Amino acid sequence: MTALAENVAGAGGVEPPEPRRPGRRRSGAWRLAVLALLGLYFLVPIAASVWFTARDRGQGGFTAEHYAEIPGAPGFAEAFTRSLALGGLTVAIALLLMVPTIVLVTLRLPRLRTTVELLTLMPLVLPPIALVVGVRSVLAWAPDHFLGTPLAEAFFALQEPALPWILVFVYVVLALPFVYRALDAGVRGADLPTLTEAARSLGASWPRVLVSVVLPVLRTSVLNAAFLTLALVLGEFTIANILGFETFPTWIVRISGSQPQLSVAVSVLSLAMTWMLLLLISALDRRRGPKESA
Amino acid sequence: MLAVEAFRATDPVTFEETWSTDSITAVTDGAYRRAYLGSLQLSLITAVLGAVLGLALAVAILRSRRGRLLRRLVLTASGVLANFGGIPLAFAFLATIGNAGVVTALLQDTFGIGLGGFSLYSMTGLALVYLYFLIPLMVLIIIPALEALRPQWREAADNLGASGWQYWRYVGGPVLAPPVLGATMLLFASAFAAYATAKALVGSSVPLVTLQIADALSSNVVVGAESLGKALALGMVVVVGLVMIFYAWVQRRTQRWLA
C-alpha cells in the first residue's frame, strides 16, 4: 500500500503510519503531487493569457504593443480614474465608520462585539445581485413619489454618471466584512485596553491616546483594510453593470468584443498589480499574512 | 448609521408588499426552475470539489518545511483570486481554452485534436473557472482551523501507539469536520452568488439564477419583469439564508475545540 494512493483517497489528510517515531514524519510524495497539480492548474491560464497578449499576429514574434496601448485605449483613462475615485471615497467612508466603531467596541462596549460582528458580516450573506435589486427599487421609488422635490433631486444626484455616489454607498456596505476583519485582527493582536490604560495613567489625553497609541498600533490593519476595499471597488462588476455605470471592470467587458487581446492584457495586468500590492503589504505586516474574507 | 445603510438596500427585496403571487409562481416553473436547479447543481459540485482540493493545498503548504515564502505567496495569491478575480479570471480562461485560446490552438496545431467535446461556454467550463476562485477561498478559510490543531493531540496519540490513520480517524478528522463543512457552505454561497465570471463567459446561454435576474432587470419588453427579478432575488436570499443558518450552527460546534 503506497502512501500516495492511500492519501489521495483521504483528501490529503492522512499520513503514512509511523507509530514508533513521533515527531519525525516523512514529507510524503503526495504533497509534491498536490502542489505540482494545483500549481499547474493555477499557472497555465495566467501563462496562456500572457502568451495570448504578447503574440504578434502579423509576424509571429513577440510584442508588448497590447500592454503599451492600454493607457491610450479609448475610455480606459476615464473608467479607471472613475473607479479609483470611487475606491478612494469608499475607503475613506468605510474607515471613518469602522475605525472609531472598533476602538469604541474594544475599549468601552465589549458587550456589543457580537452585534457589530454580525452586522458587518451581513453583506457576505447577501448576493450582490440580490442587493442590486433592492438598490434599484429604492432608486426608482423616490422619483416616482416625490418628483420635483429636493428628495428626488438628491436621488438623481446620487446617480450622476460621472461620479455615481450611489455606488460608493453600496460599496461601503460590501466592503464592511473586509474592513472589519482586517481591523479586528489588528485589535486582537495588540491588546489595546492595556496600552490605552498605560497611556492614560501616564497622563495622556484621549485624543492624544488615539493619535499616538491606537492609530500606530493599527497601522498595518488600516493599510490592509484600505487596500482590500480598493481592490474590491476596482474589481466590482455586478452592481456597476446592472445599474448601468461605466467603471473599470465594465469597461473591460465592453471592449472585449472588439479588442480581445487588449481586454486580456488589462485583466492580467490588474491581477498582477493587485497581487504585488498585497504581497508588499503582507511583507510590511510581520505578524500575520492578509486576512481571509469569510 | 451602518444598520440603516444595510437595511435601506435590502428592505425592498425582503419586505416588498405589492407582490401578487404571480411572480412567485412564475419563478418556480419552467426556465426559472431550470435556472435554480442549474445554479444549485453548479454551486454544489464546485463547492465540494473546491473544498477537497483547497484542503489538500492548505495541508500541503502548511506542512512544507521551508514553506514561509511559499505560504506567503500562496496566501496572498489566494486573497487576490478569491475576492477580486471575477472579470479578469473569465478573460484569462477565454485566452486559454476559449474558441481562440492558446491551449485550444496548441492542441489543434500540434496534435490535431480539439478539446474533445469540452467547451468553456458550458456548465463544465464554468465549473472549471469557478474552481479557480473557490480553491483559494477554501485555503484562506481553512488555514486557521488547520493551524489550531494542537500538536499535543498528535503527540498524545503517537505515544498511546495510535497509527496515523487512527489519529485522523478518531482525533483530527472529528475536530476538523465542522470547520471543513462550514467552509464548504461558504464556498457554496460564494459560487451561488457569483455573477461577473459567468456573465463575461457565457452571457446567458447557461441557466443560472444570477444571469436570469440580470436579464429580468434589464428587460424592457416583459411587463412585470422587475417584480420577477425581485422574486428571483428573494429566492436566492432564502437559499443563502438557509445555508448561513446551518453555517452558524456548525460554527458553534467548531468553537468547542478550535477557539
Image: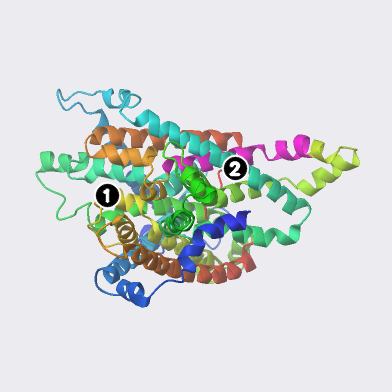
Secondary structure beneath disc 1?
A: helix
Picture disc at residue A32: none
| Along the viewing direction, whichever of A259 and B89 lies nearer the viewer | A259
Q: Is residue B122 above or below residue A54?
A: below
Image x and y of residue A190, in percent: 72, 45
Mark 1 = which residue? B201
Identity of the residue furthest to the left in this view: B112
Q: Which chain carries label 2?
A: A
Does B138 appear in magenta? no
For residue A120, which quarter of the picture?
bottom right
**Res A19 visible:** yes
Picture disc at residue A93: 2
Q: Mark 1 lies on which chain?
A: B
Looking at numbered disc 2 in the image, what kind of residue is underneath it? Ile
Q: Is residue A273 left or right of residue A121?
A: left
Residue located at (23% from left, 24% from top) = A62
Residue located at (17% from left, 39% from top) = B106
Secondary structure beneath disc 2?
A: helix
**How many numbered marks, from 0 up?**
2
Image x and y of residue A13, in percent: 46, 60
Magenta residues, start to end = A210-235
Looking at numbered disc 1 in the image, what kind of residue is underneath it? Leu
For residue B218, which quarter of the picture?
bottom left
Residue located at (25% from left, 33% from top) = A261
Q: Is the magenta stretch mostly helix, strand or loop?
A: helix
CA gap between label 1 and label 2 equals 33 Å
